[in-house]
Image (cartoon, rainbow, N blue to C red):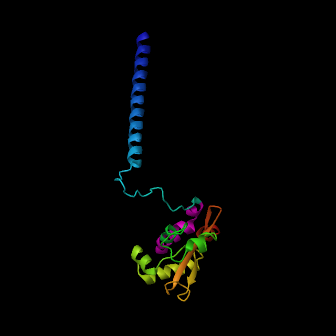
Amino acid sequence: MEEDSDMKSNEEDRKRRLWEKTVHEIRSKQSERYLERFAVNAKPNQKVINSKQFIPISFELFDNPDFRNSFMTKKRFRTYLYFRRRVIRGKNCHDPLDLHFHYWISGELATSMPLGKIAKDLNLSKSTVSDHIKQLEKERIIIVDKIEASEAYDRKLHLVLILGTCHDGCEEWFIDDVFKNS
């Protein structure tokens, strides 16, 4: 009997040591992965890109079948995300329309860029980009303000795309309102 109890005790000790070894290996691998993930391999004076940038889409929006199974599958969704990524939230010297002053300070999430640049970046034709803008505007996902050539500093037509509002740091996107009731 004593031998049985010693054998059980030895077996339990062996299992416990094996488990502790397994846990130690798991934690070691987790530490290595953490260090690899957050290690910065930048050279001195090299600009480090912030990897924490993202375009948030609420779970409520993503759970909506009309959004997920319809709008997300359209090519204009990619165009919309491109616009959303480029919303002006601060003063920018490359912002000749001063969107920061005229839109952001007034609580609107806006962007503007030439159709040619958008088309080139998205590998689409200008007419396709124009169609996407018209469709997004028709669906009330964006609002388009036109700055006529006669009013612009460079005498060219500019489109300002408004994607939502921001008050007291709380951003609300028109796309959420569109799919909230569907």
Q: Nearer the viewer, residue 3 or 144?
A: 144
Rendered residue at 55%/68% (across/down)? 67
Rendered residue at 40%/12% (across/down)? 3
Q: Judge left or right: residue 74 versus residue 164.
A: left
Residue 165 sits above or below residue 125 on the image: above
User: Magenta stretch mostly in which secondary structure?
Assistant: helix
Q: Answer whether residue 94 is visible to the viewer in this image.
A: yes
> Picture coordinates of residue 62 (x, y %)?
55, 62
> Picture coordinates of residue 102 (x, y %)?
60, 74
> Where is the C terminus found, in terms of image quarters?
bottom right
Q: Is residue 66 magenta?
A: yes
> Picture coordinates of residue 160 (x, y %)?
55, 78
Residue 91 sits above or below residue 6 on the image: below
Question: Residue lying furthest bottom in this view?
Answer: 150
Q: Nearer the viewer, residue 171 or 25?
A: 171
Q: Judge left or right: residue 160 versus residue 1.
A: right
> Picture coordinates of residue 108 (x, y %)?
61, 71
Residue 135 sits above or below residue 21 on the image: below
Q: Judge left or right: residue 49 versus residue 95.
A: left
> Where is the N terminus found, in terms of image quarters?
top left
The magenta-colored residue range is 60-80
